[in-house]
Image (cartoon, rainbow, N blue to C red):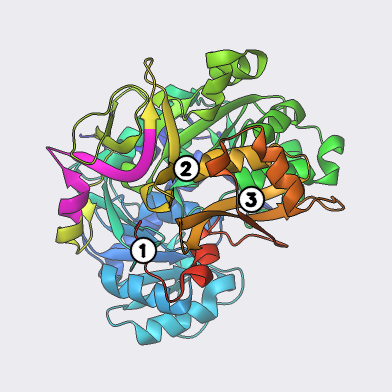
Amino acid sequence: MSETLGSVLARAARQHARAEAVVDGETRWSYAELDARVQAFDAALDELGLEQGDVVAVLAQNSAEHLVTWLAIPRSGRVLNDLNYRLAPAELEFILGDSGAKALVVDDGFLEVGQRLASTVDGIEHLIHAGAGPTPDGCSSFEALSTSGAARALESLDPDALAGIFYTGGTTGLPKGAMLSHRNLIQNAKHMLIALGYDESDTYIHAAPMFHLADGASLFGITWVGGKHVTQRAFTPASWLALVESERATRGMLVPTMVAMVLEEPSLAERDISSLRSVMYGASPMPTALLARAMQSIPCDWYQGYGMTEAAPLVSMLTAREHRAGIAGAGQVADRLRSSGRPIVGVEVEVRGPDGAPCAEGEPGEIYVRGANVMRGYWNRPAETAQALVDDGWYRTGDAAWMDADGYLYIVDRIKDMIISGGENVYSTEVENAIYRHEAVLECAVFGIPHPRLGEQVHAAVVTRAGAAVDADDLVEHCRGLIAGYKLPRSIEFLDALPKSGAGKILKRDLRAPFWQGHERQVS
């Protein structure tokens, strides 16, 4: 039988049946119990009349039930559409309609939203309640469906069959659904196993939202080897630290904003987190100053993963060894902490110029990616698929970077976020790294705003640490010795918080939008 997502849990259930598989508050399931629930829910979807290729959407916080949906929905050829619960109802309505979802799974936190969506979106035939309370009228009970259904034999599927539609955040225009096959997600699981070395002794905390592949990147890899899943319903730094201590967690994944929150958490010094073997970070660049603090305060192996939804998601990795060498070293070795590592085994990466030709060493261009992990295309978007997938399977990422002689990848910006000021290209990540090196800065985002003469000027939005005293002049002078004059922020605003996506990414589009009302931006 070909490797498909169903075979991942089947292997774990055979080899680790009695091992603890899932911890969610008071809920604790073995792999045998998890497999029984997954088979039952899979069979129940048959009974509801959902066939191969039908889309089942999920709107829920992290939970044991949410994990079951990931493992059960694609198992017999149905398609998972895990929804970003931070989107507005109108955005969720568009995604459900665009994907053609026939069923929607909701927990207690999103029951009312789910009921409204089920009544307004044509095509939704079943609303499945995965909450703790009584099953509301008009809903099916997830508990009943996942415990009373018959065992469902694993059937043979085409590895290239669609397993999930994962919608991008819609930073420009409407959200696009990246189509990921069983092969795509299986390949990513292998990449994670090779890069991080997960095994049956590992306990992984699902802290980032499960709807985002920053967390989903490890889900199948941990399952494949019989590791333990610990779900954190909603991230707070205090509860994350408490879970690491109480469950003796060994593995974690945090985006940089979450890392910053953990480092500011007063209980950090009191918690025993010595069980941690590694923390992977990704989804956005980690400022070097923040990384140094993190490695000192949380003394485990640190990895950086670079990727995107369209690549299922892992593309490159900066290893723990390279992190340790970078902190201890100088020159080129230290500079590599600013990189996103090298492409992982099984993935090809090229940096190309506007003409599509490969860039010279050190020359910025757009990252192109090819491998068995790269998506089939965008759901219902043939024109955008044709723009994104070119030259026999290469995916154009829209990320700007340069590559050194040893294959290390240095992300400098999103192509659309690059600032063109007075004819010079300014990459926001370089300016952000300089600002972050000021001890008063907690978070920052750099982007271009209109300027009558320069076209765009460099602008920074900054959040300072509690009690810190710093003004715009202080920050500019701090940066002056670190970056060229034309890259210095010409304006700085101080905010209480920065807007973030469900995965913890800072939303520059929201920060930038007020400045560009009535103006046409040339970089898109």
Mark 3 lies on residue? 444
Instruction: Sort mark 3 into few (<14), some (14-19) or many (20+) by Cα contacts within 10 Å.
Output: many
Could you tell me the amino acid type at mark 1? Answer: Thr
Q: Residue at x 45, y 25 (%)?
A: 341
- Image position of 428 with respect to 223: above or below: below
Front residue (pair 129, 464): 464
Q: Position of residue 57 (x, y in %)?
A: 38, 65
Mark 2 and mark 3 in contact? Answer it, CB < 8 Å: no
- CA gap, disc 2 to disc 3? 14 Å
Element carrying mark 2: loop
Left or right: 314, with 278 as reference point = left
- CA gap, disc 2 to disc 1? 19 Å
Q: Residue at x 42, y 33 (%)?
A: 224
Q: Position of residue 479 (x, y in %)?
A: 66, 39
Quadrant containing the C terminus in the rendered view: bottom left
Q: Assess whether residue 518 is covered by the magenta stretch.
A: no
Mark yes or no: residue 229 visible.
no
Mark closest to the chain's N terminus, 3 or 1: 1
Mark 1 lies on residue? 172
**Where does the magenta region start and end?**
385-401
Q: Residue at x 80, y 46 (%)?
A: 265
Instruction: Sort mark 2 into few (<14), some (14-19) or many (20+) by Cα contacts within 10 Å.
Output: many
Mark 2 lies on residue? 427
